[in-house]
Image (tube, grey):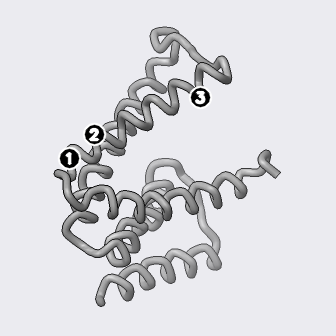
């Protein structure tokens, strides 16, 4: 069960949904940037424990330079995303913020076409259209 990518993708979506609810409740009385920092520290501690437990530590200096550059860029993009997301949750309703945030799905598809050369079939394009339309309709509340 835990060897299929769809299982992990579904669990990611579930935990992302919980993240929105927990973050909305947690950011209520503190600055959104501090909430993001606190969350990041929790993630670092959790992942350090997990990597240690699974004995997956690798010296970063031994990693491929290209991989490090893209992981650095990914980290910066994640940080900017989280800062914006927490601020949006602090000042807006989670039921409207989360669907707009999930337009990231559409951005991933478009960017994967442009930068990774991936292709979609007609059914997948209908899905992209429906995701876009659904997010916009929900956000028009």
SS type, badge 3: helix
Residue 24, image x, y percentages: 33, 63
Helix, strand or loop at label 1? It is helix
Q: Is residue 38 left or right of residue 112?
A: left
Crowding near the residue tagged with mark 3, few <14, some 14–19, many ≥20 C-alpha atoms within 10 Å? few
Q: How crowded is mark 1: few (under 14 residues within 10 Å), some or many (20 or more)?
A: some
Residue at x 44% of width, y 57% of height: 19
Residue at 45% x, 49% y: name it: 115
Residue carrying label 3: 50
Q: The C terminus is located in which quarter? A: bottom left
Proximity of marks 2 and 1: CB atoms separated by less than 8 Å: yes
Which of the two discs, 3 and 2, labels the residue nearer the N terminus?
Answer: 2
* Disc 2 element: helix
Question: As drawn, which residue projects farthest toward the front?
Answer: 29
- Residue at x-position 40% and y-position 79%: 135
Comparing 90 with 63, the one in front is 90
Which residue is more in the foreground, 40 or 5?
40
Q: Position of residue 1 (x, y in %)?
A: 82, 52
Q: Name the residue under label 2.
A: 37
Which of the numbered marks, if any, corresponds to residue 33? 1
């Amino acid at each position: 069960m835990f060897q299929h990518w769809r299982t992990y993708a579904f669990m990611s979506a579930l935990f992302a949904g919980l993240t929105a609810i927990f973050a909305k409740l947690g950011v209520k009385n503190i600055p959104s940037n501090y909430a993001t920092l606190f969350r990041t520290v929790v993630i670092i501690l959790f992942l350090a424990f997990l990597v240690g437990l699974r004995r997956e530590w690798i010296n970063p200096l031994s990693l491929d330079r290209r991989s490090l550059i893209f992981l650095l860029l990914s980290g910066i993009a994640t940080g900017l995303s989280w800062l914006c997301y927490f601020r949006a949750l602090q000042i807006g309703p989670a039921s409207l913020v989360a669907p707009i945030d999930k337009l990231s799905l559409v951005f991933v598809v478009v960017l994967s076409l442009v930068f990774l050369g991936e292709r979609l079939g007609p059914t997948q394009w209908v899905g992209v259209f429906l995701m876009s339309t659904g997010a916009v309709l929900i956000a028009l509340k």
